Image (cartoon, helix red, strand yellow):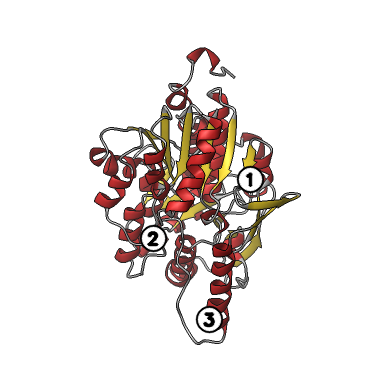
Amino acid sequence: MLLLISNRRLDDVKSGSGAYLVTFIKSAILAGYDVRLVMSPSTAFGSRPWATLDKPILDRVTPEWPSSVRLGSTFVSTKPLVWFRFAQRLALETARRLKLTKAKPVSLLSRIPSASEQAQLAAVVRRHAPSCVVVEYSSFAPAFAHMSQVPGRGVLMHDLFSSRADSFRAAGKKPDHGDITLAQEAQRLASANLILHASMNELQRLSPLAPNARHVWMRPTTTARRDAQQSRPPAALFMGAGHEGNREGLNHLLADIWPLVRARLPDAKLIVAGTIGDGLASENGVEAVGRVDDLASLAGPDRIGLAPIRVSSGVAIKVADYMGLGMPVIGYPGGLDGFGSELDSASIRVHSTEAFADALVELLTSEEKRRARSEAGLKLAETTLSDSGIVEALAVFRSPSKVATS
């Protein structure tokens, strides 16, 4: 058995780090594990005391949520602390709407769980006696100090919080989570023996400080949608969920990059897909299409995937999605560095607003260059991005003969 301990809401896992979690679960099942999802009793509710688990999760794993009551697919917290946190969040939102404060809520993801929460999780682990326990984020790794009897103690690192804090400061912003240094983050991981990184460059940064663990790059997987390739009117595309890094990137795109493009190509079109576009006006060549059920409707070499990400950590999953959809990609290092140099044949890495606009104009006006980048991305989707790379890493904690081969 493998216990996956999550400390965040999982009501939408179709994009962002939620998609990574589904990839991980698929890999754990391929490695021969019966996977049980354990939700952290307090932190996973965030600032709302009820939550659902998205269908891609419920279809694959058995959930367990201590200190909650299940009503169908909804879990309701029985912990007073969670309800108190909800009241605090309501008060803050009311004050923000009345313009009494500009303060923003701080993410709980980087906080180490309380002693009582760690004790509850350790009790669950003792009851199941799993071969492997994997927690999300470095913040929950200190709980391994109570689980030394478990052979596999892994951490799924969607983000290196110290890198995320650095990127926020570099952009002149306050980190949206508790601040932490790289050395402090490495210390949290002292009891882990397997660290699964979403980002190649974060793996390279952290691994020298955590030499007792095996470090594996869990690259995002995607499927090459050759079946959906067709000619469409050339357009740029930005897609994603409504988190802070995406909001900053979209604001920069609309305020700084897009005006330069439209000045040279007055008929240029920009499509914004996903919840990041909620409330966005469709003007100046911008079309907000909201959540898209089938991304194949956006696919093809004439749609140019944009990753103007400057405030980030982990890896921009949208880049892998773009390539699976057959799109050429343009991005800042913040959107591409998580892949190392693996995707350079299909993407254009730029370092300034002007260079971003130049690259976009070039692709919008050159069918030949769009086609070349598109084909390179599809090939990467069929090779580099076809395997998460972690089945073998997980399988070492159980009998190799039980590892699935399909």
| Dot label at residue 114 | none
Q: Alpha-carbon distance for marks 1 and 2?
A: 33 Å
Q: Name the residue under label 3.
A: 96
Say whether disc 1 or disc 2 marks the residue closer to the N-terminus: 1
Q: Element at badge 2?
A: loop
For residue 231, the mark is 1
Tell me the residue at 51%/42% (across/down). Answer: 5
Label 2, residues with CA under 10 Å away: few <14, some 14-19, many ≥20? many
Most extreme residue toward the top is: 401
Vertical side of 377 occupied by 257: above or below:
below
**Image location of residue 359, percent across then percent down:** 41, 55
Residue 155 visible somewhere in the drawing:
yes
Among numbered discs 3 and 2, the one appearing first in the sequence: 3
The residue identified by callout 2 is: 311
Q: Inspect the image, locate mark 3, and give the three-letter code of the amino acid beneath it.
A: Arg
Label 2 near label 3: C-beta < 8 Å? Answer: no
Task: Give the amino acid type for the residue marked by disc 1 in the picture.
Answer: Ser
Q: What residue type is labelled 2?
A: Val
Q: Name the residue rendered at 55%, 56% in the picture.
A: 240
State which quarter of the image contains the N terminus. Answer: top right
Circle 1: element type? loop
| Placement of 164 over or under 277, stated as above or below | above
Q: Using residue 334 as the reference point, say whether residue 204 is left or right of it.
A: left
